[in-house]
Image (spheres, rainbow, N blue to C red):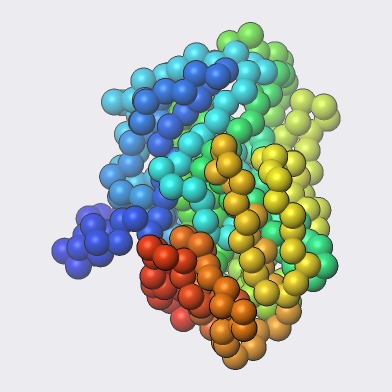
Amino acid sequence: MKGFLTAAALSLAVTDVSAHYIFQQLTVAGTKYPVNQYIRKNTNYNYPVTDLTSNDLRCNVGADGSTTETVTVKAGDSFTFTSDTAVYHQGPVSIYMSKAPGKASDYDGSGGWFKIKDWGPTFSGGSASWTLSDTYSATIPTCIPSGDYLLRIQSLGIHNPWPAGIPQFYIACAQITVTNGGSGNPGPTALIPGAFKETDPGYTANIYTNFNSYTVPGPAVFSCNGGGSNPSPSSSSSPAPAQSSTTSKAATPTTTTTKAPTTTTLVTSTKAATTSSAPSGGCTVAKWGQCGGQGWTGCTTCASGSTCNKTNDYYSQCV
Protein backbone atom coordinates (compact mmCIF):
# COMPACT_ATOMS: atom_id res chain seq x y z
CA MET A 1 0.00 0.00 0.00
CA LYS A 2 1.52 3.27 -1.02
CA GLY A 3 0.98 6.74 0.34
CA PHE A 4 -1.56 7.23 3.09
CA LEU A 5 -4.97 5.85 3.90
CA THR A 6 -7.89 8.07 2.96
CA ALA A 7 -10.39 8.92 5.68
CA ALA A 8 -12.87 6.45 4.20
CA ALA A 9 -10.28 3.67 4.02
CA LEU A 10 -9.12 4.36 7.56
CA SER A 11 -12.69 4.23 8.79
CA LEU A 12 -13.16 0.88 7.09
CA ALA A 13 -9.94 -0.43 8.62
CA VAL A 14 -11.07 0.52 12.11
CA THR A 15 -14.60 -0.89 11.83
CA ASP A 16 -13.63 -4.12 10.07
CA VAL A 17 -10.25 -4.78 11.68
CA SER A 18 -11.44 -8.06 13.23
CA ALA A 19 -12.15 -9.47 9.78
CA HIS A 20 -8.47 -10.19 9.02
CA TYR A 21 -5.35 -11.44 10.77
CA ILE A 22 -1.69 -10.63 11.27
CA PHE A 23 1.34 -12.68 12.34
CA GLN A 24 2.67 -10.90 15.40
CA GLN A 25 4.54 -13.36 17.62
CA LEU A 26 7.66 -15.45 17.14
CA THR A 27 8.68 -18.60 18.99
CA VAL A 28 12.29 -19.81 18.74
CA ALA A 29 13.48 -23.17 20.12
CA GLY A 30 10.44 -23.35 22.40
CA THR A 31 10.55 -19.77 23.71
CA LYS A 32 7.54 -17.66 22.72
CA TYR A 33 8.28 -13.94 22.66
CA PRO A 34 5.89 -11.02 23.25
CA VAL A 35 3.87 -9.42 20.47
CA ASN A 36 6.09 -7.65 17.91
CA GLN A 37 9.33 -8.52 19.67
CA TYR A 38 11.69 -9.51 16.84
CA ILE A 39 8.85 -9.03 14.31
CA ARG A 40 8.68 -5.79 12.34
CA LYS A 41 5.50 -3.99 13.35
CA ASN A 42 3.29 -2.96 10.44
CA THR A 43 1.07 0.12 10.30
CA ASN A 44 -1.97 -1.17 8.39
CA TYR A 45 -3.59 -3.01 11.30
CA ASN A 46 -4.23 -6.61 10.18
CA TYR A 47 -5.12 -5.71 6.62
CA PRO A 48 -3.51 -7.38 3.59
CA VAL A 49 -1.25 -6.09 0.83
CA THR A 50 -2.72 -6.48 -2.67
CA ASP A 51 -0.33 -4.50 -4.91
CA LEU A 52 2.04 -6.90 -6.70
CA THR A 53 4.44 -4.05 -7.54
CA SER A 54 4.75 -2.65 -4.01
CA ASN A 55 7.79 -2.98 -1.76
CA ASP A 56 5.25 -3.57 1.02
CA LEU A 57 5.05 -7.16 -0.25
CA ARG A 58 8.39 -7.76 1.47
CA CYS A 59 7.50 -7.24 5.13
CA ASN A 60 4.13 -5.41 5.11
CA VAL A 61 3.11 -1.75 5.24
CA GLY A 62 5.28 0.47 7.43
CA ALA A 63 7.32 -2.48 8.76
CA ASP A 64 10.43 -0.65 10.01
CA GLY A 65 13.46 -2.70 10.94
CA SER A 66 15.34 0.08 12.67
CA THR A 67 13.11 -0.14 15.75
CA THR A 68 12.98 -3.95 15.82
CA GLU A 69 15.27 -6.21 17.85
CA THR A 70 17.07 -9.18 16.30
CA VAL A 71 16.99 -12.65 17.88
CA THR A 72 19.74 -15.26 17.64
CA VAL A 73 18.72 -18.59 16.11
CA LYS A 74 20.91 -21.64 15.59
CA ALA A 75 20.82 -23.33 12.20
CA GLY A 76 18.55 -26.33 12.65
CA ASP A 77 16.43 -24.64 15.33
CA SER A 78 12.66 -24.73 15.05
CA PHE A 79 10.56 -21.57 15.02
CA THR A 80 6.87 -20.68 14.97
CA PHE A 81 4.88 -17.69 13.77
CA THR A 82 1.64 -17.04 15.68
CA SER A 83 -1.22 -14.89 14.37
CA ASP A 84 -3.70 -12.82 16.36
CA THR A 85 -6.57 -14.75 14.75
CA ALA A 86 -6.31 -18.13 13.05
CA VAL A 87 -5.81 -17.92 9.28
CA TYR A 88 -9.19 -18.55 7.66
CA HIS A 89 -8.85 -17.37 4.05
CA GLN A 90 -8.27 -20.26 1.66
CA GLY A 91 -4.82 -20.16 0.11
CA PRO A 92 -1.22 -21.27 0.62
CA VAL A 93 1.10 -20.26 3.45
CA SER A 94 4.84 -19.98 2.77
CA ILE A 95 8.04 -19.21 4.69
CA TYR A 96 10.84 -17.21 3.03
CA MET A 97 14.31 -16.05 4.07
CA SER A 98 16.60 -13.31 2.72
CA LYS A 99 20.19 -12.76 3.87
CA ALA A 100 21.04 -9.22 4.91
CA PRO A 101 24.30 -7.72 3.64
CA GLY A 102 24.88 -6.41 7.16
CA LYS A 103 22.50 -6.02 10.08
CA ALA A 104 18.96 -7.29 9.68
CA SER A 105 17.69 -4.05 11.22
CA ASP A 106 19.24 -2.07 8.34
CA TYR A 107 18.05 -4.39 5.57
CA ASP A 108 15.18 -3.38 3.29
CA GLY A 109 14.64 -6.85 1.80
CA SER A 110 15.67 -5.79 -1.71
CA GLY A 111 17.95 -8.80 -2.17
CA GLY A 112 17.04 -12.34 -3.17
CA TRP A 113 14.50 -14.38 -1.21
CA PHE A 114 14.49 -18.17 -0.99
CA LYS A 115 11.60 -20.29 0.23
CA ILE A 116 12.01 -22.93 2.94
CA LYS A 117 8.45 -24.22 3.35
CA ASP A 118 4.98 -24.26 1.76
CA TRP A 119 1.57 -25.31 3.04
CA GLY A 120 -0.63 -25.94 0.01
CA PRO A 121 -3.90 -27.77 -0.62
CA THR A 122 -4.56 -31.49 -0.86
CA PHE A 123 -7.16 -32.93 -3.17
CA SER A 124 -9.32 -35.95 -2.38
CA GLY A 125 -12.75 -37.17 -3.44
CA GLY A 126 -13.46 -34.15 -5.60
CA SER A 127 -12.60 -31.64 -2.87
CA ALA A 128 -9.62 -29.50 -1.93
CA SER A 129 -8.64 -29.03 1.72
CA TRP A 130 -6.51 -26.28 3.23
CA THR A 131 -4.94 -26.47 6.67
CA LEU A 132 -5.62 -23.14 8.36
CA SER A 133 -4.05 -22.43 11.74
CA ASP A 134 -2.97 -19.73 14.18
CA THR A 135 0.55 -21.22 14.31
CA TYR A 136 2.96 -22.22 11.55
CA SER A 137 6.22 -23.95 12.44
CA ALA A 138 9.34 -24.75 10.43
CA THR A 139 13.09 -25.23 10.89
CA ILE A 140 16.04 -23.03 9.93
CA PRO A 141 17.99 -25.02 7.28
CA THR A 142 21.18 -26.41 8.80
CA CYS A 143 23.33 -25.66 5.74
CA ILE A 144 22.68 -21.96 5.22
CA PRO A 145 25.53 -19.52 6.02
CA SER A 146 25.59 -17.79 9.38
CA GLY A 147 24.57 -14.15 9.47
CA ASP A 148 21.56 -11.86 9.70
CA TYR A 149 18.36 -12.70 7.82
CA LEU A 150 14.80 -11.57 7.38
CA LEU A 151 12.47 -14.49 8.12
CA ARG A 152 9.19 -13.93 6.30
CA ILE A 153 5.79 -15.63 6.55
CA GLN A 154 3.16 -15.12 3.86
CA SER A 155 -0.47 -16.18 3.77
CA LEU A 156 -1.91 -15.71 0.28
CA GLY A 157 -5.71 -15.48 0.45
CA ILE A 158 -7.22 -16.52 -2.90
CA HIS A 159 -10.84 -16.49 -1.70
CA ASN A 160 -11.53 -13.52 -4.02
CA PRO A 161 -11.01 -15.10 -7.46
CA TRP A 162 -9.03 -13.00 -9.93
CA PRO A 163 -9.90 -10.90 -11.94
CA ALA A 164 -13.26 -10.07 -10.31
CA GLY A 165 -11.52 -10.07 -6.92
CA ILE A 166 -7.95 -9.45 -5.80
CA PRO A 167 -5.90 -12.05 -3.90
CA GLN A 168 -4.61 -10.86 -0.54
CA PHE A 169 -1.13 -11.14 1.00
CA TYR A 170 -0.86 -11.32 4.80
CA ILE A 171 2.81 -10.84 5.65
CA ALA A 172 5.23 -10.46 8.55
CA CYS A 173 9.04 -10.43 8.84
CA ALA A 174 11.14 -11.43 11.83
CA GLN A 175 14.76 -10.33 12.22
CA ILE A 176 17.13 -13.16 13.08
CA THR A 177 20.85 -13.84 13.39
CA VAL A 178 21.68 -17.40 12.31
CA THR A 179 24.62 -19.06 14.08
CA ASN A 180 26.32 -22.43 13.59
CA GLY A 181 25.47 -22.26 9.90
CA GLY A 182 27.00 -24.09 6.98
CA SER A 183 28.35 -23.31 3.53
CA GLY A 184 25.21 -23.95 1.49
CA ASN A 185 24.07 -21.69 -1.32
CA PRO A 186 20.29 -21.45 -0.81
CA GLY A 187 18.13 -21.01 -3.86
CA PRO A 188 16.49 -20.53 -6.21
CA THR A 189 15.96 -16.95 -5.16
CA ALA A 190 13.45 -14.35 -6.28
CA LEU A 191 13.02 -10.64 -5.79
CA ILE A 192 10.03 -9.23 -3.94
CA PRO A 193 8.20 -7.55 -5.60
CA GLY A 194 8.64 -9.62 -8.74
CA ALA A 195 8.17 -13.12 -7.38
CA PHE A 196 4.40 -13.01 -7.95
CA LYS A 197 2.65 -12.09 -11.19
CA GLU A 198 -0.94 -11.75 -12.35
CA THR A 199 -0.28 -14.62 -14.77
CA ASP A 200 0.73 -17.10 -12.06
CA PRO A 201 -1.85 -19.92 -11.91
CA GLY A 202 -1.45 -20.02 -8.14
CA TYR A 203 -2.51 -16.37 -8.04
CA THR A 204 -5.36 -16.54 -10.54
CA ALA A 205 -6.85 -19.86 -9.33
CA ASN A 206 -10.61 -19.97 -8.75
CA ILE A 207 -11.16 -22.25 -5.77
CA TYR A 208 -14.92 -22.38 -6.36
CA THR A 209 -15.01 -23.79 -9.90
CA ASN A 210 -13.28 -26.92 -11.24
CA PHE A 211 -10.52 -26.60 -8.66
CA ASN A 212 -8.54 -29.85 -8.92
CA SER A 213 -4.87 -28.80 -9.04
CA TYR A 214 -2.74 -26.03 -7.64
CA THR A 215 0.89 -24.82 -7.66
CA VAL A 216 2.00 -22.51 -4.86
CA PRO A 217 3.37 -19.24 -6.32
CA GLY A 218 6.99 -18.21 -5.87
CA PRO A 219 10.31 -20.04 -6.21
CA ALA A 220 10.84 -23.72 -5.48
CA VAL A 221 11.31 -24.74 -1.84
CA PHE A 222 15.00 -24.92 -0.86
CA SER A 223 16.35 -27.97 0.92
CA CYS A 224 19.86 -28.71 2.15
CA ASN A 225 19.43 -32.18 0.64
CA GLY A 226 19.85 -31.14 -2.95
CA GLY A 227 17.55 -28.15 -3.42
CA GLY A 228 13.80 -28.20 -3.75
CA SER A 229 10.98 -28.29 -6.23
CA ASN A 230 7.64 -26.61 -6.58
CA PRO A 231 4.86 -28.58 -4.88
CA SER A 232 3.03 -30.98 -7.08
CA PRO A 233 -0.36 -29.84 -8.37
CA SER A 234 -2.08 -32.27 -6.03
CA SER A 235 -0.31 -31.51 -2.76
CA SER A 236 1.80 -29.01 -0.83
CA SER A 237 5.58 -29.32 -0.88
CA SER A 238 5.75 -30.02 2.85
CA PRO A 239 3.44 -31.59 5.43
CA ALA A 240 0.71 -29.49 6.97
CA PRO A 241 0.56 -29.07 10.75
CA ALA A 242 -0.66 -32.17 12.58
CA GLN A 243 -4.40 -32.44 12.94
CA SER A 244 -7.09 -34.89 13.94
CA SER A 245 -9.70 -33.78 11.45
CA THR A 246 -10.79 -35.88 8.48
CA THR A 247 -11.21 -34.41 5.03
CA SER A 248 -14.78 -34.65 3.81
CA LYS A 249 -15.45 -36.16 0.41
CA ALA A 250 -18.76 -34.37 0.02
CA ALA A 251 -19.07 -31.62 -2.53
CA THR A 252 -20.32 -29.19 0.12
CA PRO A 253 -17.47 -27.34 1.93
CA THR A 254 -17.24 -28.18 5.61
CA THR A 255 -15.13 -26.95 8.51
CA THR A 256 -13.60 -28.98 11.33
CA THR A 257 -11.40 -27.68 14.13
CA THR A 258 -8.84 -29.30 16.42
CA LYS A 259 -7.34 -27.96 19.64
CA ALA A 260 -3.87 -26.69 20.61
CA PRO A 261 -2.88 -25.32 18.22
CA THR A 262 -6.04 -24.06 16.58
CA THR A 263 -6.10 -25.75 13.18
CA THR A 264 -8.91 -25.78 10.65
CA THR A 265 -9.21 -27.89 7.54
CA LEU A 266 -11.39 -26.01 5.11
CA VAL A 267 -12.73 -28.15 2.29
CA THR A 268 -13.65 -26.40 -0.94
CA SER A 269 -15.90 -27.97 -3.54
CA THR A 270 -14.20 -28.42 -6.90
CA LYS A 271 -17.45 -28.81 -8.83
CA ALA A 272 -18.87 -26.14 -11.10
CA ALA A 273 -20.61 -23.26 -9.38
CA THR A 274 -24.37 -23.45 -9.03
CA THR A 275 -27.04 -21.14 -7.72
CA SER A 276 -26.66 -20.60 -4.00
CA SER A 277 -29.15 -22.48 -1.85
CA ALA A 278 -29.30 -23.41 1.81
CA PRO A 279 -28.92 -27.16 2.46
CA SER A 280 -31.43 -29.10 4.52
CA GLY A 281 -30.69 -30.37 7.99
CA GLY A 282 -30.31 -27.03 9.79
CA CYS A 283 -26.51 -26.95 9.53
CA THR A 284 -24.55 -23.95 10.82
CA VAL A 285 -21.17 -22.41 10.02
CA ALA A 286 -18.60 -21.81 12.76
CA LYS A 287 -17.25 -18.31 13.33
CA TRP A 288 -14.77 -17.23 10.58
CA GLY A 289 -16.17 -19.85 8.19
CA GLN A 290 -17.69 -19.13 4.77
CA CYS A 291 -21.46 -18.64 4.78
CA GLY A 292 -22.25 -17.36 1.28
CA GLY A 293 -21.09 -16.00 -2.05
CA GLN A 294 -21.68 -16.60 -5.73
CA GLY A 295 -21.85 -20.35 -6.33
CA TRP A 296 -21.88 -21.19 -2.62
CA THR A 297 -23.95 -24.31 -1.85
CA GLY A 298 -22.95 -24.82 1.77
CA CYS A 299 -24.51 -23.67 5.01
CA THR A 300 -25.65 -20.06 5.17
CA THR A 301 -26.61 -19.87 8.85
CA CYS A 302 -23.87 -18.82 11.27
CA ALA A 303 -23.39 -20.41 14.66
CA SER A 304 -24.72 -18.56 17.69
CA GLY A 305 -22.72 -15.42 18.41
CA SER A 306 -21.77 -14.62 14.81
CA THR A 307 -23.50 -13.24 11.73
CA CYS A 308 -22.97 -13.71 7.99
CA ASN A 309 -21.10 -10.68 6.61
CA LYS A 310 -20.72 -10.13 2.84
CA THR A 311 -17.12 -9.39 1.81
CA ASN A 312 -17.76 -9.42 -1.92
CA ASP A 313 -19.93 -11.20 -4.51
CA TYR A 314 -17.84 -14.36 -4.12
CA TYR A 315 -17.36 -14.53 -0.38
CA SER A 316 -19.39 -14.01 2.79
CA GLN A 317 -18.06 -14.94 6.21
CA CYS A 318 -19.37 -15.56 9.73
CA VAL A 319 -17.96 -12.84 11.97
Residue that extends furthest to the top in the rendered view of this protein: 180
Residue that extends furthest to the bottom in the rendered view of this protein: 275
Identify the image quadrant of the N terminus. Answer: bottom left
Q: Position of residue 3 (x, y in %)?
A: 25, 55
Q: Can residue 142 be seen from the camera position used here?
A: yes
Identify the image quadrant of the C terminus. Answer: bottom left
**Residue in front for this viewpoint, 131 or 303:** 303
Residue that extends furthest to the left in the rendered view of this protein: 7
Relative to 144, is 260 above or below? below
Q: How many marks?
A: 0
Q: Position of residue 223 (x, y in %)?
A: 76, 31
Residue pictured at 38% horizontal, 63% vertical: 305
Residue pictured at 73% horizontal, 79% vertical: 271
Q: Is residue 1 left or right of residue 263?
A: left
Give the quarter of the image for residue 107.
top left
Q: Can residue 99 be seen from the camera position used here?
A: no
Q: Position of residue 311 (x, y in %)?
A: 41, 72
Give the quarter of the image for residue 224.
top right
Residue pictured at 38% horizontal, 59% vertical: 19
**Residue in front for this viewpoint, 55 or 91:** 91
**Residue in front for this viewpoint, 124 or 140:** 124
Relative to 30, is 315 above or below? below
Residue pictured at 45% horizontal, 41% vertical: 83
Relative to 185, is 277 above or below? below
Q: Position of residue 7 (x, y in %)?
A: 16, 64
Q: Is residue 243 left or right of residue 277?
A: right
